[in-house]
Image (cartoon, helix red, strand yellow):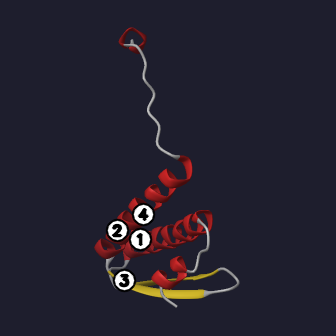
């Protein structure tokens, strides 16, 4: 199974967020290993129901994948929590 099918298999936003977070964590671990070794890096996730395995070539590709997943993760968090803005008087900023 690949990452796309793994994420698409989530039935709720919370489950999708959890799966994306798991992928990001696995990629971060591989990025640490890729710093010392610039060969093909791969990772796998086994959540008890599904196993996925993906390979990346080099640290740059891993970093791009992490950045892309972080953007997707932030969108999901915004859907779950909503966006908010706090307005404060300028005098209270010192």
Q: Nearer the viewer, mark 1 or mark 2?
A: 2
Q: Earlier in the sequence, mark 2 or mark 3?
A: 3
Q: Is residue 10 left or right of residue 31?
A: right
Q: Position of residue 3 (x, y in %)?
A: 48, 81
Query: Around disc 1, counting alpha carbons within 10 Å, would you say few (fewer than 14), some (14 to 19), or many (20 or more)?
Result: many
**How far apart are labels 1 and 2 at the CA level?**
7 Å
Image quarter of the C terminus: top left
Q: Earlier in the sequence, mark 1 or mark 3?
A: 1
In the image shown, does 89 or 11 lie closer to the viewer?
11
**How far apart are labels 2 and 3 at the CA level?**
10 Å
Disc 2 element: helix
Residue located farthest toward the right when viewing the structure as drawn: 48
Q: Residue at x 48, y 87 (%)?
A: 2
**How far apart are labels 1 and 4 at the CA level?**
19 Å
Residue with the mark numbered 2: 63
In the image shown, does 5 or 50 lie closer to the viewer?
5
- Contact, CB < 8 Å: mark 3 with mark 4? no
Query: Around disc 4, counting alpha carbons within 10 Å, would you say few (fewer than 14), some (14 to 19), or many (20 or more)?
Result: some
Query: Around disc 3, counting alpha carbons within 10 Å, would you say few (fewer than 14), some (14 to 19), or many (20 or more)?
Result: some
Residue with the mark numbered 3: 56
Position of 34 relative to 78 (above/below) = below
**How far apart are labels 1 and 3 at the CA level?**
10 Å
Residue with the mark numbered 4: 72
Q: Is residue 37 left or right of residue 24?
A: left
Q: Nearer the viewer, mark 2 or mark 4?
A: 4
Residue located farthest toward the top when viewing the structure as drawn: 91
Residue with the mark numbered 1: 31
Position of 93 relative to 37 (above/below) = above
């Amino acid at each position: 199974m690949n990452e796309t099918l793994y994420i698409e298999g989530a039935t709720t936003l919370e489950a999708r967020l959890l799966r994306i977070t798991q992928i990001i964590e696995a990629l971060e671990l591989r990025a640490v290993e890729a710093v010392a070794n610039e060969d093909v890096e791969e990772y796998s996730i086994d959540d008890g129901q599904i196993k996925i395995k993906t390979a990346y070539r080099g640290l740059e590709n891993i970093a791009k994948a992490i950045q892309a997943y972080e953007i997707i993760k932030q969108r999901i968090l915004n859907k779950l929590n909503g966006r908010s803005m706090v307005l404060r008087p300028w005098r209270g900023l010192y």
